[in-house]
Image (tube, rainbow, N blue to C red):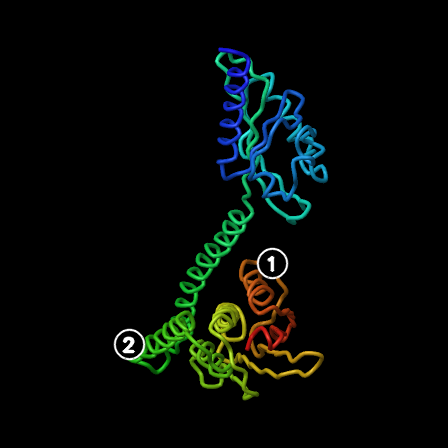
Amino acid sequence: MNLEDLYRLMRNSHVEAQGIIDTVPDPLLVLDESLCVRTASRAFFTTFNVDRDETIGKHMYELGNQQWDIPELRRLLEEVIPKSTAVVDYEVEHDFPSIGRRTMLVSAHRLFHPDNNSRTLLLSIVDATERRQHEAEKDVLLGELRHRMKNLLGLVQAIARQTTVTGRSGEEYRDAFLGRFNALVQAHHATYSQEGEADLQEVLQRTVEPYSERPTGVLVEPGPGVPLAAKQIMSLSLILHELATNAVKYGALSIPEGQVRVRWEVEEASAPSLRLVWQESGGPPVTPPTSSGFGTQLIDFAVNRELAGRVELNYAPAGLVVEIVAPLGSVS
Protein backbone atom coordinates (compact mmCIF):
# COMPACT_ATOMS: atom_id res chain seq x y z
CA MET A 1 0.00 0.00 0.00
CA ASN A 2 1.50 3.29 -1.10
CA LEU A 3 0.97 6.74 0.38
CA GLU A 4 -1.84 7.58 -2.07
CA ASP A 5 -3.75 4.42 -1.17
CA LEU A 6 -3.33 5.17 2.51
CA TYR A 7 -4.59 8.72 2.00
CA ARG A 8 -7.59 7.44 0.00
CA LEU A 9 -8.41 4.90 2.71
CA MET A 10 -8.19 7.51 5.46
CA ARG A 11 -10.31 9.96 3.46
CA ASN A 12 -12.97 7.33 2.75
CA SER A 13 -13.06 6.41 6.44
CA HIS A 14 -13.48 10.07 7.37
CA VAL A 15 -16.27 10.56 4.81
CA GLU A 16 -18.01 7.42 6.01
CA ALA A 17 -17.76 8.50 9.67
CA GLN A 18 -19.11 11.97 8.83
CA GLY A 19 -21.88 10.33 6.80
CA ILE A 20 -22.89 8.28 9.81
CA ILE A 21 -23.01 11.42 11.97
CA ASP A 22 -25.03 13.30 9.33
CA THR A 23 -27.54 10.46 9.07
CA VAL A 24 -28.60 10.79 12.72
CA PRO A 25 -31.74 13.01 12.77
CA ASP A 26 -30.89 14.74 16.06
CA PRO A 27 -28.09 17.34 16.33
CA LEU A 28 -24.70 15.86 17.22
CA LEU A 29 -21.38 17.42 18.21
CA VAL A 30 -18.02 15.72 18.51
CA LEU A 31 -15.89 17.49 21.14
CA ASP A 32 -12.22 17.08 21.95
CA GLU A 33 -10.94 16.85 25.50
CA SER A 34 -10.97 20.66 25.77
CA LEU A 35 -14.66 20.65 24.76
CA CYS A 36 -13.92 22.30 21.42
CA VAL A 37 -16.01 21.20 18.41
CA ARG A 38 -14.17 18.80 16.12
CA THR A 39 -17.16 18.14 13.89
CA ALA A 40 -20.92 18.59 13.87
CA SER A 41 -23.82 16.87 12.18
CA ARG A 42 -25.92 18.31 9.39
CA ALA A 43 -28.89 18.28 11.82
CA PHE A 44 -26.97 20.57 14.19
CA PHE A 45 -26.39 23.19 11.48
CA THR A 46 -30.03 22.95 10.34
CA THR A 47 -31.62 23.00 13.79
CA PHE A 48 -29.65 25.97 15.13
CA ASN A 49 -29.42 27.77 11.77
CA VAL A 50 -25.61 28.15 11.92
CA ASP A 51 -22.77 27.37 9.51
CA ARG A 52 -19.46 25.53 9.86
CA ASP A 53 -17.39 28.66 10.44
CA GLU A 54 -19.55 29.51 13.47
CA THR A 55 -19.16 26.00 14.88
CA ILE A 56 -16.06 23.97 13.98
CA GLY A 57 -13.08 24.73 16.22
CA LYS A 58 -15.18 26.77 18.63
CA HIS A 59 -15.40 25.98 22.30
CA MET A 60 -18.80 24.57 23.17
CA TYR A 61 -19.45 27.37 25.67
CA GLU A 62 -18.85 29.96 22.94
CA LEU A 63 -21.47 28.61 20.54
CA GLY A 64 -24.45 30.83 19.74
CA ASN A 65 -24.95 33.33 22.54
CA GLN A 66 -23.22 31.12 25.12
CA GLN A 67 -26.43 29.12 25.64
CA TRP A 68 -24.49 26.05 26.72
CA ASP A 69 -22.32 27.87 29.27
CA ILE A 70 -24.27 26.62 32.28
CA PRO A 71 -22.33 25.91 35.50
CA GLU A 72 -24.12 22.64 36.23
CA LEU A 73 -23.76 21.39 32.64
CA ARG A 74 -20.11 22.50 32.62
CA ARG A 75 -19.45 20.45 35.78
CA LEU A 76 -21.20 17.39 34.35
CA LEU A 77 -19.33 17.50 31.04
CA GLU A 78 -15.96 18.01 32.66
CA GLU A 79 -16.57 14.91 34.78
CA VAL A 80 -17.34 12.72 31.75
CA ILE A 81 -13.80 12.76 30.39
CA PRO A 82 -11.82 11.61 33.45
CA LYS A 83 -14.46 9.32 34.97
CA SER A 84 -15.91 7.54 31.91
CA THR A 85 -19.36 8.57 33.07
CA ALA A 86 -22.16 10.02 30.97
CA VAL A 87 -24.60 12.90 30.96
CA VAL A 88 -28.10 11.78 29.99
CA ASP A 89 -30.99 14.14 29.10
CA TYR A 90 -29.74 17.24 30.88
CA GLU A 91 -32.48 19.81 30.27
CA VAL A 92 -31.55 23.22 28.86
CA GLU A 93 -34.31 25.81 28.39
CA HIS A 94 -33.07 28.85 26.53
CA ASP A 95 -33.86 31.56 23.97
CA PHE A 96 -31.66 30.30 21.14
CA PRO A 97 -30.55 32.65 18.34
CA SER A 98 -32.72 32.35 15.20
CA ILE A 99 -35.05 29.64 16.56
CA GLY A 100 -36.48 31.19 19.74
CA ARG A 101 -37.20 29.57 23.08
CA ARG A 102 -36.64 25.84 23.17
CA THR A 103 -36.25 23.02 25.67
CA MET A 104 -33.26 20.86 24.72
CA LEU A 105 -32.14 17.56 26.25
CA VAL A 106 -28.35 17.17 26.18
CA SER A 107 -26.58 13.80 26.47
CA ALA A 108 -22.81 13.24 26.41
CA HIS A 109 -20.79 10.01 26.17
CA ARG A 110 -17.11 9.27 25.72
CA LEU A 111 -16.46 7.99 22.24
CA PHE A 112 -15.72 4.25 22.33
CA HIS A 113 -12.10 3.20 21.90
CA PRO A 114 -10.78 -0.39 22.15
CA ASP A 115 -8.13 0.70 24.66
CA ASN A 116 -10.72 2.75 26.62
CA ASN A 117 -8.53 5.83 26.50
CA SER A 118 -10.67 8.05 24.28
CA ARG A 119 -10.80 11.66 25.32
CA THR A 120 -13.43 12.57 22.72
CA LEU A 121 -17.04 13.31 23.59
CA LEU A 122 -20.11 12.61 21.50
CA LEU A 123 -22.79 15.14 22.40
CA SER A 124 -26.39 14.61 21.27
CA ILE A 125 -29.10 17.28 21.50
CA VAL A 126 -32.82 16.50 21.33
CA ASP A 127 -35.46 19.21 20.93
CA ALA A 128 -38.06 18.32 23.59
CA THR A 129 -40.07 21.54 23.36
CA GLU A 130 -43.23 20.00 21.91
CA ARG A 131 -42.91 16.95 24.15
CA ARG A 132 -42.76 19.12 27.27
CA GLN A 133 -45.74 21.16 26.03
CA HIS A 134 -47.75 18.00 25.40
CA GLU A 135 -46.82 16.69 28.84
CA ALA A 136 -47.95 19.95 30.45
CA GLU A 137 -51.23 19.89 28.51
CA LYS A 138 -51.77 16.26 29.47
CA ASP A 139 -51.22 17.10 33.13
CA VAL A 140 -53.85 19.85 32.86
CA LEU A 141 -56.31 17.47 31.18
CA LEU A 142 -55.76 14.74 33.76
CA GLY A 143 -56.16 17.27 36.56
CA GLU A 144 -59.33 18.56 34.91
CA LEU A 145 -60.71 15.01 34.61
CA ARG A 146 -60.00 14.20 38.27
CA HIS A 147 -61.47 17.54 39.33
CA ARG A 148 -64.57 17.07 37.18
CA MET A 149 -65.23 13.56 38.51
CA LYS A 150 -64.85 14.77 42.09
CA ASN A 151 -67.23 17.64 41.39
CA LEU A 152 -69.80 15.39 39.72
CA LEU A 153 -69.87 13.01 42.66
CA GLY A 154 -70.16 15.91 45.08
CA LEU A 155 -72.88 17.43 42.93
CA VAL A 156 -74.96 14.24 42.96
CA GLN A 157 -74.76 14.24 46.76
CA ALA A 158 -75.79 17.91 46.86
CA ILE A 159 -78.74 17.31 44.52
CA ALA A 160 -79.86 14.41 46.69
CA ARG A 161 -79.70 16.57 49.85
CA GLN A 162 -81.47 19.54 48.27
CA THR A 163 -84.31 17.69 46.56
CA THR A 164 -87.28 18.44 48.78
CA VAL A 165 -88.46 15.58 50.98
CA THR A 166 -91.31 17.27 52.86
CA GLY A 167 -94.75 16.21 51.61
CA ARG A 168 -93.34 13.68 49.15
CA SER A 169 -93.53 9.92 49.10
CA GLY A 170 -90.41 7.86 48.46
CA GLU A 171 -91.49 7.38 44.84
CA GLU A 172 -92.08 11.12 44.36
CA TYR A 173 -88.69 11.93 45.87
CA ARG A 174 -87.06 9.39 43.57
CA ASP A 175 -88.74 10.85 40.49
CA ALA A 176 -87.82 14.43 41.49
CA PHE A 177 -84.18 13.46 42.15
CA LEU A 178 -83.85 11.45 38.94
CA GLY A 179 -85.46 14.29 36.98
CA ARG A 180 -82.77 16.73 38.11
CA PHE A 181 -80.05 14.14 37.72
CA ASN A 182 -81.12 13.24 34.18
CA ALA A 183 -81.32 16.92 33.25
CA LEU A 184 -77.76 17.35 34.49
CA VAL A 185 -76.61 14.28 32.52
CA GLN A 186 -78.22 15.62 29.35
CA ALA A 187 -76.66 19.04 29.87
CA HIS A 188 -73.19 17.52 30.25
CA HIS A 189 -73.71 15.27 27.24
CA ALA A 190 -74.84 18.18 25.07
CA THR A 191 -71.92 20.30 26.27
CA TYR A 192 -69.16 17.86 25.39
CA SER A 193 -70.65 16.49 22.17
CA GLN A 194 -71.51 19.85 20.62
CA GLU A 195 -70.78 20.17 16.91
CA GLY A 196 -71.28 23.36 14.96
CA GLU A 197 -72.47 26.70 16.29
CA ALA A 198 -75.02 27.50 18.99
CA ASP A 199 -76.38 30.74 20.42
CA LEU A 200 -75.06 31.96 23.76
CA GLN A 201 -78.51 32.07 25.39
CA GLU A 202 -79.21 28.48 24.38
CA VAL A 203 -75.87 27.35 25.83
CA LEU A 204 -76.50 29.22 29.10
CA GLN A 205 -79.99 27.84 29.64
CA ARG A 206 -79.07 24.30 28.70
CA THR A 207 -76.01 24.31 30.94
CA VAL A 208 -77.13 25.98 34.18
CA GLU A 209 -80.87 25.43 34.55
CA PRO A 210 -80.59 21.74 35.61
CA TYR A 211 -78.67 22.85 38.71
CA SER A 212 -81.75 24.34 40.37
CA GLU A 213 -84.89 22.51 41.46
CA ARG A 214 -86.88 25.77 41.64
CA PRO A 215 -87.83 27.65 38.44
CA THR A 216 -86.45 30.87 39.93
CA GLY A 217 -83.23 29.33 41.28
CA VAL A 218 -81.27 30.13 38.12
CA LEU A 219 -82.39 33.08 35.98
CA VAL A 220 -80.84 33.57 32.57
CA GLU A 221 -81.77 37.09 31.54
CA PRO A 222 -82.42 37.70 27.81
CA GLY A 223 -79.66 39.38 25.86
CA PRO A 224 -78.35 39.95 22.33
CA GLY A 225 -77.66 37.00 20.09
CA VAL A 226 -74.05 35.80 20.20
CA PRO A 227 -73.13 32.75 18.06
CA LEU A 228 -70.52 30.43 19.56
CA ALA A 229 -68.32 27.90 17.77
CA ALA A 230 -67.96 24.36 19.17
CA LYS A 231 -64.61 25.02 20.86
CA GLN A 232 -65.93 28.14 22.61
CA ILE A 233 -69.12 26.29 23.62
CA MET A 234 -67.05 23.65 25.41
CA SER A 235 -64.86 26.22 27.16
CA LEU A 236 -67.78 28.38 28.28
CA SER A 237 -69.81 25.36 29.36
CA LEU A 238 -66.86 24.10 31.40
CA ILE A 239 -66.72 27.47 33.18
CA LEU A 240 -70.49 27.48 33.81
CA HIS A 241 -70.51 23.92 35.11
CA GLU A 242 -67.70 24.81 37.50
CA LEU A 243 -69.53 27.90 38.79
CA ALA A 244 -72.86 26.08 39.09
CA THR A 245 -71.29 23.13 40.89
CA ASN A 246 -69.70 25.43 43.45
CA ALA A 247 -73.02 27.30 43.83
CA VAL A 248 -74.83 24.04 44.58
CA LYS A 249 -72.19 22.80 47.00
CA TYR A 250 -71.30 26.02 48.84
CA GLY A 251 -72.98 29.07 47.32
CA ALA A 252 -76.39 30.49 46.53
CA LEU A 253 -77.90 27.23 45.26
CA SER A 254 -76.95 25.34 48.44
CA ILE A 255 -80.07 26.73 50.23
CA PRO A 256 -83.67 27.13 48.98
CA GLU A 257 -83.65 30.95 49.19
CA GLY A 258 -80.54 31.40 47.02
CA GLN A 259 -80.53 32.54 43.43
CA VAL A 260 -78.15 32.87 40.49
CA ARG A 261 -78.65 35.47 37.77
CA VAL A 262 -76.73 35.33 34.50
CA ARG A 263 -76.67 38.27 32.13
CA TRP A 264 -74.54 39.49 29.27
CA GLU A 265 -74.05 42.34 26.88
CA VAL A 266 -72.03 43.15 23.79
CA GLU A 267 -69.73 46.11 24.27
CA GLU A 268 -68.71 48.24 21.32
CA ALA A 269 -65.28 49.72 21.88
CA SER A 270 -62.17 49.55 19.73
CA ALA A 271 -63.25 45.95 19.10
CA PRO A 272 -66.59 44.31 20.04
CA SER A 273 -66.43 42.17 23.18
CA LEU A 274 -68.74 39.99 25.23
CA ARG A 275 -69.26 40.81 28.92
CA LEU A 276 -70.86 37.94 30.84
CA VAL A 277 -71.82 38.31 34.51
CA TRP A 278 -72.62 35.48 36.94
CA GLN A 279 -74.16 36.87 40.16
CA GLU A 280 -75.23 34.91 43.23
CA SER A 281 -77.51 36.21 45.99
CA GLY A 282 -79.49 34.96 48.95
CA GLY A 283 -77.00 32.23 49.82
CA PRO A 284 -74.71 31.71 52.81
CA PRO A 285 -72.27 34.55 53.59
CA VAL A 286 -69.28 34.43 51.26
CA THR A 287 -65.70 34.43 52.47
CA PRO A 288 -62.79 34.71 50.01
CA PRO A 289 -60.70 31.51 49.72
CA THR A 290 -57.26 31.53 51.30
CA SER A 291 -55.71 29.90 48.24
CA SER A 292 -56.49 29.33 44.58
CA GLY A 293 -58.00 25.87 44.07
CA PHE A 294 -57.97 23.82 40.90
CA GLY A 295 -61.49 25.01 40.02
CA THR A 296 -60.37 28.64 39.98
CA GLN A 297 -57.28 27.71 37.96
CA LEU A 298 -59.51 25.82 35.52
CA ILE A 299 -61.72 28.89 35.02
CA ASP A 300 -58.65 31.10 34.52
CA PHE A 301 -57.22 28.63 32.00
CA ALA A 302 -60.47 28.37 30.02
CA VAL A 303 -61.04 32.13 29.90
CA ASN A 304 -57.44 33.18 29.20
CA ARG A 305 -56.34 30.40 26.87
CA GLU A 306 -59.53 29.32 25.10
CA LEU A 307 -61.59 32.53 25.02
CA ALA A 308 -58.60 34.91 24.89
CA GLY A 309 -60.31 37.01 27.56
CA ARG A 310 -60.07 37.88 31.23
CA VAL A 311 -62.05 36.93 34.32
CA GLU A 312 -62.66 38.67 37.64
CA LEU A 313 -64.02 36.83 40.70
CA ASN A 314 -65.49 39.09 43.40
CA TYR A 315 -66.18 37.24 46.65
CA ALA A 316 -68.68 39.79 47.95
CA PRO A 317 -70.32 38.89 51.30
CA ALA A 318 -73.78 38.98 49.67
CA GLY A 319 -72.78 36.52 46.96
CA LEU A 320 -70.11 35.62 44.44
CA VAL A 321 -69.95 37.80 41.33
CA VAL A 322 -67.96 36.57 38.33
CA GLU A 323 -67.35 38.79 35.32
CA ILE A 324 -65.93 37.42 32.07
CA VAL A 325 -64.87 39.67 29.20
CA ALA A 326 -63.79 38.15 25.90
CA PRO A 327 -63.29 39.55 22.40
CA LEU A 328 -66.17 38.61 20.12
CA GLY A 329 -63.70 37.75 17.43
CA SER A 330 -62.46 34.84 19.59
CA VAL A 331 -65.87 33.53 20.66
CA SER A 332 -67.98 33.97 17.55
201 versus 5 height, above or below: below
Q: Which residue sits at x=52%, y=11%?
A: 2
Q: What residue type is labelled 2?
A: Gly
Nearest to the observer: residue 254 or residue 144: 144
Task: Name the residue tied to disc 2.
Answer: 170
Q: Which residue sits at x=44%, y=56%?
A: 146
What is the CA distance from the residue labelled 1 to the residue labelled 2? 40 Å
SS for tag 1? loop
Nearest to the observer: residue 67 or residue 40: 40
Q: Is residue 121 left or right of residue 234?
A: right
Task: Name the residue tied to disc 1.
Answer: 292
Q: Which residue sits at x=65%, y=69%?
A: 312
Image location (x, y in percent) of residue 13? 50, 23
- Sequence order check, earlier mark of 1 and 2: 2
Image location (x, y in percent) of residue 177? 35, 75
Image location (x, y in percent) of residue 176? 34, 79
**Where residue 280 is drawn, which disc sits there?**
none
215 versus 286 height, above or below: below
